[in-house]
Image (spheres, rainbow, N blue to C red):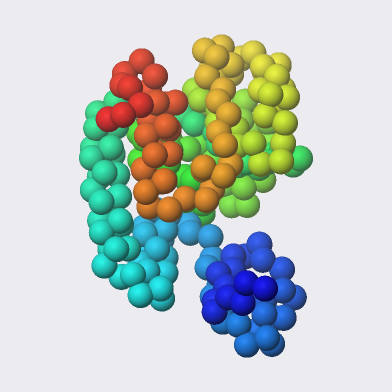
Amino acid sequence: MLEPDMVLATSLTDVRAVEKLGRLGIKVISIPPPGSFDELCKQFLELGEILGEEEKARKIVNDARNKVGLIRKKAGNLSSPRVFVQIGSSPLFAATDDYFIDDFVGFAGGTNIAEKSKTGLYSREEVIKRNPDVIVVVTMGIAGDKEIENWKNYKTLNAVKNNRIHLVDPYRLCSSTPESFVDMLEEFVEILHPDETGRKL
């Protein structure tokens, strides 16, 4: 038996499992999904404090903030494509500004067409109406290749006409640390500005 002193839980963790661990005398710390890069950094610092690694966590966060700042500055001088980030297919679900995924788009110099959607539930008709230049499909339990083929049926979309539909690995996108956030942000810059800059800024 591993006999942990502490368990980190997310909003996806079964409540019954959390309660059972508590009854066993195991400390459970719930970490909500971060809504922004700033929240991600704050959570990382809090975790560093809990683990007694404040100095190491602070250095990681400061380095990430500096790199993100440089990327944002350079991306701000590039074009501003309209982007749709799909994180579900049945029903169609979009990344809104309640998700830190929205920061990948904004920091990379793009505009998230679903940013102000209240629930994230979206329709293909609304995507057609807003006509994104880029579609990013997060393969969260959905067949990414099939989704690309589905979008190709909507030939009036700029993203389809210019062959700018991209698949992104959900683990890399949604399980970010400050360090991995930088790596994913660099990938978004490449996706949004393939003719203006390389992957590494």
Instruction: Decide if residue 132 is on the left or right side of residue 65.
Output: right
Q: Is residue 132 left or right of residue 197?
A: right
x 64%, y 36%: residue: 139
> Residue at left 35%, top 26%?
199
Q: Is residue 97 visible?
A: no
Residue 75 position in % (x across, y down): 29, 32
Across and down, in percent, residue 14 comes to 71, 68
Split into 4 quadrants, where in the image is the N terminus?
A: bottom right
> Camera-side residue: 13 or 195?
13
Residue at 51%, 42% in the rendered image: 172
Task: Locate residue 166 relative to residue 63 in the image: left or right.
Answer: right
> In which quadrant will I find the C terminus?
top left
Q: Nearer the viewer, residue 94 or 67?
A: 67
Q: Is residue 6 above or below residue 31?
A: below
Viewer-nearest residue: 143 or 153: 143
Q: On screen, 174 above or below 62?
A: above
